[in-house]
Amino acid sequence: MNDKEIVSEFMQVKQENDVIHILVRGISWPQPHEPVSSWKVASVLPQTSSPQEVDFKVQAILENKQYFQICQGCEERNLRGWMHNDGICQGCAEKNHGVVY
Ligand SMILES: [Zn+2]
């Protein structure tokens, strides 16, 4: 997945009331094999923000390790909830380290 796909899949820009909300999808695993996703507001911008300012913020969130991390195995950016740990994604954990999800 490239960054553009990640943004369209895992992020939303919503205009609500007088502000612009940038939402990021969070994944949690209450049970194995059953990920639950929920949208969280990652950033709030004034309604007067230009599209460039919104893009800039989206990019900053993409690079924020609180939300996304780059896997050292496949070097893909992953949603934090899809990471096995700080270093590798679940796909790589499964493939290379015998972890089964
Ligand atoms: Zn990986």
Image (cartoon, helix red, strand yellow):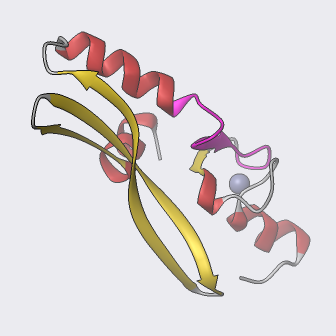
Name which residue lies at 47% across and 47% down. Answer: 1
Q: Which image quarter: residue 65? A: top right
Residue 60, position in %: x, y?
49, 22
Q: Which image quarter: residue 72? A: top right
Dividing the image into four equal quarters, which quarter contains ligand 1? Answer: bottom right
| Residue 64 shown left or right of residue 88 in the figure | left
Name which residue lies at 47% across and 76% down. Answer: 36
Q: Is residue 56 magenta?
A: no
Which residue ends up furthest to the left in the rendered image? Answer: 17
- Work out whether 75 lies above or below 43: below
What are the residue bounds of the magenta stretch? Answer: 62-74
Given residues 37 and 43, the one toward you in this image is 43
Given residues 58 and 5, the one toward you in this image is 58
- Work out whether 81 lies above or below 7: below
Name which residue lies at 44% across and 24% down. Answer: 59
Name which residue lies at 86% across and 67% down. Answer: 96
Given residues 6 and 44, the one toward you in this image is 44
Residue 101, position in %: x, y?
71, 82
